[in-house]
Image (cartoon, helix red, strand yellow):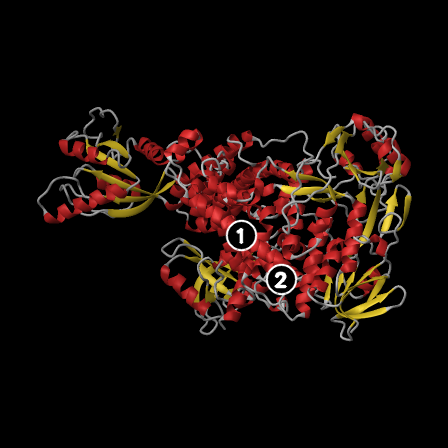
């Protein structure tokens, strides 16, 4: 627990949208007196300070000293405690563009605001009780999320899918523990012996395993996957890359080997955020520069989550292709494309997807193959409970281990004091995600379920 | 100054408090309403049980009296939970009530530095500033000045008794309430509440048909509660078990409106874990029967106690429903069951030393703090007396942590969480119960008791010898390897060949007693000490795991908070936490973190505050 050494409700400002070119940029300000401070920089039909919460005002952001207008803005006013942070706050929507954003932030800095520290909005929200720990993490991930699906997953967690899931598991375990505790603390009285339910334990273990299995997918949506586009020179990698990127970033030419280095681009394929790498043509060469490119390509292929490998259908499968595919196989999943079907309409060999980077024929099949290769059997849609932070994963692993010990203990008729210790550990591990279970709650469960006491 | 210390009340709490103060060398006055009612076991004739047995042994390790009183008056002994694991085993004894009370009184009378006086305390003498207690005023107008005072009123303060339509003042059936003191405490600004408890009927032995009940015998050999000796010779008399039935429940349900509890006469909150038979029947309508233990009240009386069936229904209803129970058909009730409602002080008004925040020098212990149970009362009495003594000496109080004693759990729960119902200790209230075994109470606490001067030199020396011997046993078990020869004699040791005995013992199936034939040197040690060494080794892994957790908690525990912090001036704390901190006035960040409803962020602010003060 490290509280940052700054004051806790002074006015802060920060860009809420990514720092870069975009249609609209949002600057969020929050803190005591921030609406009045912002009002001095706002020219509109009605002062911000007179506006109720949850209203939108149109106007201009202007420097009160010089009268110079920075941008036309929409100002959303929120009043405490009904705001994201639980404090008075304003969200200013500006026209995107780095110079405008920089000028607006500079203006705020000169007029009573300081830059928010990373996570400070969420910290305030957390402290003011407008969000719990699991939600605070989810918000952070929404802010950083790269795709619509990632946002949907983060939102579903915010709305409590994961919280509800884990809470239900926790309640089941508390019931089991309550039975054990009743037997321990009332040795003479539980005469209809409530022996611990192995079935609940088994269900919980399966559920924990299932949640753990979503970590990969959650992680994938959160961080994105690295996908390398590979193939022999002139097999159409750059055309595919550009098709995916829909943006001219790499050089496309008819001369083999013009793409000399891997180039990164961020795209969304089948809802999955993907970092795309275009690689140098894989072919033996004496050209020193290109040789270096090929060496680095191998490194990229090794570190990728997936390789999309193109074969030039006009030339067909060469020895080079076969040796490269063999070297990737078993190390990284591969999606094989039989490219240029528009000019060489020969049938694709087994395992290849017929495709044309130029005409986009076969693109839906490519998308489906990428999704399948990255997500496997994961079917999580918007509402699924998915874990994607390392903290959650570790807590669930701790729970899994403790549950295994609990079950083994019951199997071997280990004494209840030790079984209870393991079970308690599992409950605490789940509790570290959604909130601690106190001994008072366990006793509550004991007394509501069992008629004990004399 | 008339006395160094005054103790109000001579129940289990007052006994320990007054003995502790006197034994620390302070002139002490014990004031009680009736010297014929010292050390009464007002409810069941038993001492010990889950968590409670551990408390008794902890009291003994620190230098208290309860274990010895129980050892010398017990009439049946059982070790509970033998099958459920050593960490949750606990000694429990049926005791002879009359003998217990007589021995308690005699022990007090014989104590040097301790004066006994029969009168009712009605008020406190308070200094001019209204900040410190300086003595007491009694019903007969006597005034006694003292430097410290320990308040232990049990169920007597402004108490009332209820049986069906009857109600009247009284702290126990036939004994007057202590009137005036509750009013005084309210006038002094204390937060005083009402709690309720109850007790079952006592019946005459000759009217019970034992052939219609199951006998429950005690163990042949009683393990002493006290660490001061290895064996006790006591009689062992049986208890009996019978059950209620549908007819019993029908009578209770039909008359439930005549219960003072259900009729709304009693406002005090009763204990959920010690429900009356009315509560059991109403709250668990599906239960076909409820268990009743028939327990002797003593060797010199024919009265028997009906454990499990406490009631405040009208006496004729009690009579009728009891007669439906097998074995109780011809029952003769000597004393009816009843409910008692009494004043208690919200324990959030106490520091962990059990001294009140409002009046310096006033300590409160026992049922007055909202607890129930003889053992809980005695444990608090001991700590209140001890800490009052340490205060007189100008030394810091002895605060036991949750990780080292059930006493620590009990007091921390009271002063940090408060209580709105009678509080009983459970093993599950202790996060670290694996390390709070009853047999290790001396290892955990005796040294501390000795340092305060409460524990005797003999007990300390005896303890040191035992500790050395246990270490010797453990060293032997670590050194001795399982040989192939051993494995031929005991095939279950095959997988441990060339590993140490200590390692093999971690397997739940391997018992130290079975290893003695392989290593005769082990036979030289007393079985109890061997057993303790064995358990220490068996539990090592679990205890290590808990120790890591304890260490994490300790870090917060070490961040001390001044009781004088002005929480309204601390930035960044939520309103709810601010109010709670101001009320509890926690003495460490660790204690603050245990207050319900306090968020991590509030604790973070406290940590910043403490750190800032340390490094300005």
Q: Residue A196 at what x, y percent from top left?
A: 58, 32
Residue furthest toward the left? Answer: A286
Position of B107 with respect to A345 (left or right) is right
User: Nearer the observer, disc 1 or disc 2?
Assistant: 1
Query: Helix, strand or loop at disc 1?
Result: helix
Where, quadrant-wise, is the N terminus of chain B in this rendering?
bottom right
**A124 or B592: which is nearer to us?**
B592
Instruction: Tell me the distance, in whole angstroms, between the alpha carbons under discs 1 and 2.
Output: 23 Å
Q: Does any portion of residue B442 appear in the rendered image? A: yes
Mark 1 surroundings within 10 Å by alpha-carbon count, few (fewer than 14), some (14 through 19), many (20 or more): some
Position of B291 with respect to A108 (left or right) is right
Q: Quadrant of residue A358?
A: top left
Query: In the rendered structure, the residue with mark 1 lies on which chain?
Result: B
Q: Which label sits on residue B398?
A: 2
Q: Residue A273 at what x, y percent from top left?
A: 36, 43
Query: In the rendered structure, the residue with mark 2 lies on which chain?
Result: B
Which residue corresponds to the image point at 70% horizontal and 67% vertical from the top-left? B25
Q: Residue B462 at what x, y percent from top left?
A: 59, 54
Q: Quadrant of residue B116?
A: bottom right
Query: Helix, strand or loop at disc 2?
Result: loop
Position of B22 with respect to A421 (left or right) is right
Q: Are marks 1 and 2 in contact (CB under 8 Å)?
A: no
Mark 2 surroundings within 10 Å by alpha-carbon count, few (fewer than 14), some (14 through 19), many (20 or more): some
Which residue corresponds to the image point at 26% horizontal and 27% vertical from the top-left? A351
Can you identify the residue that label 1 sits on?
Answer: B467
Q: Earlier in the sequence, mark 1 or mark 2?
A: 2
**B67 or A294: which is nearer to us?**
B67
Q: Residue A270 at what x, y percent from top left?
A: 37, 37
Q: Which label sits on residue B59?
A: none
A280 versus A313 height, above or below: below
């Amino acid at each position: 627990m490290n509280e940052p050494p700054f004051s806790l409700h002074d006015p802060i400002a920060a860009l809420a949208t990514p720092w870069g070119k975009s249609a609209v940029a949002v600057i969020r300000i929050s803190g005591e007196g921030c609406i009045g401070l912002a009002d001095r920089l706002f020219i509109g039909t009605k002062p911000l300070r007179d506006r109720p919460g949850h209203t939108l005002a149109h106007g201009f952001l202007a420097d009160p000293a010089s009268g110079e207008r920075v941008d036309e803005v929409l100002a959303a006013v929120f009043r405490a405690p009904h705001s994201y942070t639980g404090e008075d706050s304003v969200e200013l929507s500006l026209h995107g563009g780095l110079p405008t954003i920089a000028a607006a932030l500079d203006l705020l800095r000169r007029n009573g605001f300081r830059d928010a520290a990373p996570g400070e909005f969420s910290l305030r929200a957390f402290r003011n009780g407008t969000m719990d720990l699991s939600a605070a993490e989810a918000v952070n991930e929404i802010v950083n999320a790269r795709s619509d699906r990632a946002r949907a997953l983060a939102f579903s967690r915010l709305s409590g899918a994961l919280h509800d899931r884990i809470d239900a598991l926790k309640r089941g375990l508390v019931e089991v523990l309550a039975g054990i505790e009743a037997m321990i603390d009332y040795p003479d009285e539980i005469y209809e012996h409530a022996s611990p339910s192995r079935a609940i334990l088994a269900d919980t273990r399966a559920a924990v395993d299932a949640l753990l299995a979503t970590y990969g997918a959650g992680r994938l949506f959160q961080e994105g996957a690295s996908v390398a586009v590979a193939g022999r020179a002139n097999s159409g990698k750059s055309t595919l890359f550009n098709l995916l990127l829909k943006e001219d970033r790499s050089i496309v030419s008819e001369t083999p080997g013009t793409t000399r280095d891997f180039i990164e681009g961020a795209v969304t394929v089948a809802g999955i955020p993907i970092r795309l790498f275009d690689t140098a043509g894989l072919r033996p060469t004496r050209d020193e520069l290109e040789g270096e490119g090929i060496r680095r390509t191998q490194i990229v292929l090794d570190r990728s989550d997936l390789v999309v490998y193109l074969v030039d259908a006009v030339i067909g499968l060469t020895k080079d292709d076969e040796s490269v595919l063999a070297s990737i196989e078993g190390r990284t999943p591969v999606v094989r494309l039989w490219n240029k079907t528009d000019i060489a309409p020969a049938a694709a060999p087994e395992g290849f997807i017929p495709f044309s980077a130029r005409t986009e024929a076969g693109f839906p099949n490519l998308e489906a193959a990428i999704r399948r290769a990255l997500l496997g059997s994961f079917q999580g849609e918007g509402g699924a409970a998915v874990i994607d932070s390392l903290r959650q994963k570790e807590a669930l692993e701790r729970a899994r281990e403790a549950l295994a010990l609990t079950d083994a203990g019951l199997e071997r008729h280990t004494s209840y004091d030790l079984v209870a210790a393991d079970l308690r550990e599992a409950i605490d591990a789940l509790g570290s995600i959604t909130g601690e279970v106190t001994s008072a709650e366990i006793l509550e469960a004991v007394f509501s379920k069992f008629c004990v006491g004399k | 100054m008339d006395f160094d210390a005054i103790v109000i009340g001579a129940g289990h709490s007052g006994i320990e408090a007054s003995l502790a103060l006197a034994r620390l060398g302070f002139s002490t006055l014990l004031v009680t309403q009736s010297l014929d009612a010292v050390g009464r076991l007002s409810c069941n004739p038993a001492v010990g049980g889950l968590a409670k047995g551990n408390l008794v042994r902890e009291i003994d390790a620190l230098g208290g009296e309860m274990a010895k009183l129980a050892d010398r008056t017990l009439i049946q002994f059982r070790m509970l939970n033998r099958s459920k694991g050593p960490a949750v085993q606990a000694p429990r004894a049926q005791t002879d009530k009359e003998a217990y009370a007589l021995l308690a009184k005699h022990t007090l009378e014989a104590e040097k530095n301790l004066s006994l006086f029969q009168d009712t305390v009605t008020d406190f003498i308070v200094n001019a500033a209204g900040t410190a207690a300086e003595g007491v005023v009694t019903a007969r107008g006597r005034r006694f000045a003292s430097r410290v005072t320990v308040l232990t009123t049990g169920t007597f303060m402004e108490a009332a008794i209820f049986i069906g339509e009857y109600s009247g003042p009284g702290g126990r059936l036939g004994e007057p309430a202590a009137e005036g003191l509750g009013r005084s405490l309210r006038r002094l600004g204390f937060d005083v509440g009402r709690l309720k408890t109850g007790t079952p009927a006592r019946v005459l032995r000759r009217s019970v048909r034992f052939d219609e009940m199951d006998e429950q015998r005690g163990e042949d050999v009683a393990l002493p509660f006290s660490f001061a000796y290895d064996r006790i010779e006591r009689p062992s008399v049986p208890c009996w078990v019978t059950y209620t039935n549908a007819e019993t429940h029908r009578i209770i349900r039909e008359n439930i409106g005549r219960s003072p509890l259900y009729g709304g006469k009693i406002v005090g909150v009763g204990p959920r874990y010690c429900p009356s038979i009315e509560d059991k029947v109403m709250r668990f309508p599906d239960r076909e029967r409820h268990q009743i233990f028939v327990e002797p009240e003593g060797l010199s009386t024919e009265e028997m106690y009906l454990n499990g069936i406490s009631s405040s229904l009208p006496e004729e209803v009690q009579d009728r429903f009891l007669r439906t129970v097998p074995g109780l058909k011809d029952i003769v009730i000597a004393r009816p069951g009843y409910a008692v409602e009494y004043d208690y002080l919200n324990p959030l008004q106490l520091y962990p030393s059990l001294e009140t925040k409002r009046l310096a020098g006033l300590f409160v212990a026992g049922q007055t703090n909202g607890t129930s149970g003889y053992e809980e009362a005695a444990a608090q009495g001991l700590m209140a007396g001890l800490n009052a003594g340490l205060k007189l000496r100008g030394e810091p109080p002895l605060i036991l942590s949750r990780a080292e004693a059930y006493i620590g759990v009990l007091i921390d729960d009271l002063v940090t969480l408060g209580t709105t119902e009678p509080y009983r200790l459970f093993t599950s209230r202790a996060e670290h119960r694996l390390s709070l075994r009853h047999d290790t109470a001396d290892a955990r606490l005796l040294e501390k008791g000795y340092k305060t001067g409460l524990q005797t030199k003999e007990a300390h020396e005896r303890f040191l010898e035992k500790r050395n011997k246990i270490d010797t046993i453990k060293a032997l078990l670590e050194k001795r390897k399982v040989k192939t020869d051993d494995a031929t004699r005991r095939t279950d040791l095959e997988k441990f060949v060339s590993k140490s005995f200590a390692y093999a013992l971690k397997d739940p199936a391997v018992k130290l007693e079975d290893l003695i034939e392989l290593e005769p040197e082990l036979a030289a040690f007393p079985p109890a000490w061997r057993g303790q060494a064995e358990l220490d080794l068996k539990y090592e892994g679990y205890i290590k795991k808990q120790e890591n957790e304890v260490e994490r908690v300790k870090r917060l525990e070490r961040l001390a908070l001044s009781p004088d912090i002005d929480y309204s001036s601390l930035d960044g704390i939520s309103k709810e936490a601010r109010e709670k901190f101001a009320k509890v006035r926690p003495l460490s960040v660790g204690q603050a973190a245990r207050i319900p409803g306090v968020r991590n962020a509030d604790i973070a602010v406290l940590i910043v505050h403490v750190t800032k003060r340390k490094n300005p």
